Amino acid sequence: MKSPDYRSLSSAPPRALVTSRHNVRLVSLRVKLLLGFTLVFSIAFAGAFYWFYSFTTDHAIARLRKDMASTLSGAVQGVNVEELMALYREGEANAAGFSDDPRYRRQLEWFDTVHRIEQRAWLYSFVVDRPQNLRRIGPPAVGPEYQEAVYIVDLWAKYNPAKAARFLQSDVASSVARLVLEKDRVMEQSSIYDDSWGTWISAFAPLKDSTGRTVAILGLDIEADYIREVQRAILKQVIVAFLVGYAALFSLLYVFSGVLTRRLSGLTYAAQRIAAGDYDSTIPFKTSGRLVDEMNILAQAFTSMIHSIRIREQLIQEGQQVAKQIRHALQEERELNELKSRFIAMVSHEVRTPLTVIRTSTELLDCYGDVAPAEKRQEYFLRIRSAVRHMTQLMEDVLTIGKAEAGKLDFHPSWIDVEQFCQDILEEVQLGFSDGHVLEFIPYGNCHQAKLDKKLLRSILTNLLSNALKYSPPGSTIRLLLSCSPTLIEFTVHDEGIGIPLKDQPRLFELFHRASNATTIRGTGLGLAIVRQCVVSHRGDISFRSEEGVGTTFVVRLPVAPDATSADARMAPSTGG
């Protein structure tokens, strides 16, 4: 046997070979190794990136805070607080919203001096207090219960007036500014932040008058855009390093995992073939050698297991075959015993009743025949003839079933006038029943010539019509519909009787089977079985539909000219409507 190319199975075996009771998707060991590596590598690299990213950013921010602290400390020393507060109390705004006051210019020049030394620094001054205690231009920015900030000088007025706060412009006091007043010391913004003008880090220092009281606040914004640039550069370089490192390590692991799982994939392939019943499969690599590892030992165990399974499977198959034969024989025995029991019960009942009628009638005739009126004697004779006719029909039915089961049922078709034949059958059947039933015959099409077996057709129609009369209430209507086409004749018998329970319908054509709602009505359980055999002999089919308490309709379809050898053909008829 040619060994499969198990090298091609190193990633995932063919789907067709994967068997699972729950239709679970197979993921090979190699794929799991690669997925596990990807997960571990990603987590480890993400941790390293987070540490490096945080370390670099924190280090840059620390340096920036150090520069900001020294710059703010020097800037506070150069602010003339008395002049600043005088400007706040007495200064007037110009048309641009700033001020032409010389004191405003001197304050602005000092801020610019600091900016030329530290070009990232942008200074501004403001006062913080309740709105009712402040001087401003315009309405207050907050309610009387909150603290408000009123700007005095902003360095942006010299470089970009659009960014600058106007002279005596009010705003909501920030939490950091309020802390400066509360703690009376320099306070820094806890983190860098972004706005429409860029990225910043801020600090605030109290400005004290000659008495040492904090009367204003000096704010310093340091541009921190380069920190964002550093973060973006780190992220870009880390992504490149991740992709390069991952690709290199993944390639190495892919090759290494292929070497590790190659023999395991071959062993898996062999195990799947064995699970599929192919016990001739072989292990696709050597199971022995000088350097033996766990895979060799596993392969040897597999080889021994295959041999044991092959023997066990053979024994199981032989045992199953014997058990099947025994079950079949027991089933046939049970069916035969059941048929015998049904036949004995049927004969004991259906023969004993007419014999009792014959014996009673003859005894009455023997004892009182000479004195009984002629009408009474005629009644007794009619009872005797009816009983004899019933026993004769019973024997014919049993004989017909016997021939059919033996495959020796005679079939001799001849050309007959089907419409006239049906009318004759209706008259015969109606004579045997005196319960006032109405029999209707409705022919459709040209039904005068068809090549059928008269005897078998008589059995079909007689049994169906007799059943319809027997299981229908007195005075109800029984309809026989005859429909003919060039190739097919259809007989339909419809009644308004007790119907057939749904649970009994699948077994309706079995020998001696009677519906559960017909046990109180005389019958042998042979009629429909005979009808089925007669229909099969004509190479036709029979179907029915029935509803309990509403009625039943049987439909028999026979070819116009069946093959004369069709009695040997046993076509299973339809039994559903």
Image (tube, rainbow, N blue to C red):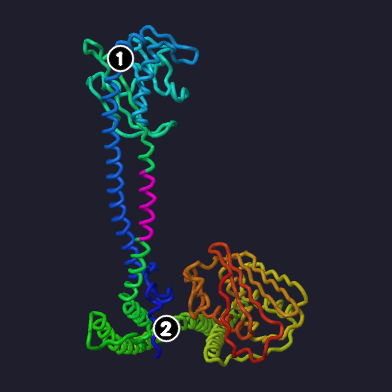
Q: How many marks?
A: 2
Q: Image quadrant of residue 496?
A: bottom right
Q: Point out residue 176 in the picture as x, y percentages from the top left corner.
A: 29, 25
Q: Mark 1 and mark 2 in contact? Answer it, CB < 8 Å.
A: no
Q: Which mark is residue 356?
A: none
**Mark positioned earlier in the residue sequence (1 or 2):** 1
- When asked about the image quadrant of residue 107, the answer is top left
Label 1: state its secondary structure. loop
Q: CA distance from mark 1 to mark 2?
A: 122 Å
Q: Amino acid at mark 2?
A: Glu
Residue 11, image quadrant: bottom left
Residue plotted at (27% across, 45% down): 55
Nearer to us in this view, 32 or 517 = 32
**Residue drawn 40% across the image and 14% down it:** 168
Q: Mark 2: few, some, or many residues within 10 Å (few <14, many ≥20)?
A: few
Tell me the residue that label 2 is attached to. 335
Residue lying at 33% horizontally and 32% vertically, measured from the top left:
201
Secondary structure under badge 2?
A: helix
Is 237 within the magenta?
yes
Q: Quadrant of the N terminus?
A: bottom left
Is residue 261 or residue 515 the one in the foreground? Answer: 261
Q: In the shown orientation, is residue 477 left or right of residue 247? A: right
Q: Is residue 378 left or right of residue 178?
A: right
Image: 499 above or below 42: below
Residue 405 showing in the rendered view: yes
Query: Of helix, strand and loop, which mostly describes the magenta segment?
Result: helix
Comparing 39 with 218, the one in front is 218
User: Could you tell me which quadrant the C terminus lies in?
Assistant: bottom right
For label 1, the residue is 80
Left or right: 4 in relation to 179: right
* Region of the chain picked out in magenta, as a range: 230-244
Q: Position of residue 179 (x, y in %)?
A: 26, 22
